[in-house]
Image: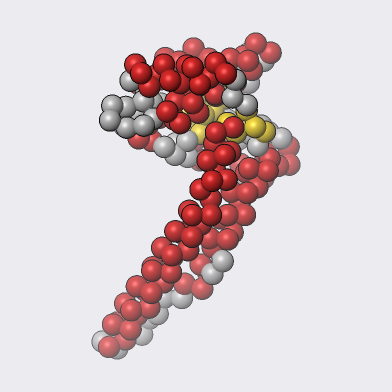
Amino acid sequence: MSLLRSAEAEAVPQIRIAELVRSEFAENVEVVQEEAEASLSRLRDQIRRMDELAGLYDSPGRLKPGHWDGHVQRCRAVADRWMEIGRTVSQSPEILERAVGRVLQTRAPSRRGRDSTKDCVILETYLEHVRAVRVSNETVAVVFLSSNTQDFADPRGGVARGIAEEFDEVGLQYARNMAVAKRLLGL
């Protein structure tokens, strides 16, 4: 939340959202929200049943999950705030060509037996954007934030080996979560 508040108040860090990420968010956010509501409801039911079972054995305690009321809606509101402050990074025609090239060559984040085209488009969008940023501002810290650790992270930490060299070439750092992004940005 502090990273979001900082970006909202000071425009530091500047948030950039790939065109495809924005459209994927719009396409999937309602389904993800419904799944989260259902999952939280199942958890609350399980807690209620466990409390009933514990009560059979004269357990004095009860969990009070009331603080989870409205949690999914609050999370959605935060996600919407990120989308509101983020500027869209448009997809040039060359991006799709480079992304398809990655898929055909099975270059990370592409993997055999899996449609990784969207991941490749997202990566190429950010690489192109960062190259443009470097022309005008060599020193600004730039972080690629993605919780998609299967495609973008190395299991030992940092960015996946198949794309690490490209990140190094443009001075792009990888963060698997907001806390890492905050640290890498020095905030």
Q: Is residue 35 above or below residue 173?
A: below
How many marks on residues?
0
What's the residue at 49%, 26% (across, down)? 121
Q: Is residue 117 visible?
A: yes
Residue 39 lies, in percent from the top left, at: 41, 63
What's the residue at 44%, 25% (across, down)? 120
Q: Is residue 144 above or below residue 44?
A: above
Instruction: Choose between 27 and 170: the one closer to the eye.
Output: 27
Residue 55 lies, in percent from the top left, at: 31, 86
Q: Is residue 80 above or below residue 53?
A: above
Give left or right: position of 67 versus 39.
Answer: right
Q: Is residue 2 visible?
A: no
Give left or right: position of 150 versus 17.
Answer: left
Q: Quadrant of residue 106?
A: top left
Residue 135 lies, in percent from the top left, at: 65, 11
Instruction: Choose between 14 and 73: the one closer to the eye.
Output: 73
Quadrant, the C terminus = top right
Colouring scheme, one of rainbow, by chain, secondary structure, one colour = secondary structure
Q: Residue furthest right?
A: 9
Q: Residue furthest left?
A: 57
What's the residue at 73%, 42% (across, down)? 9
What's the residue at 49%, 17% (across, down)? 97
Give left or right: position of 95 versus 152.
Answer: right
Residue 155 lies, in percent from the top left, at: 31, 32
Q: Quadrant of residue 165?
A: top left
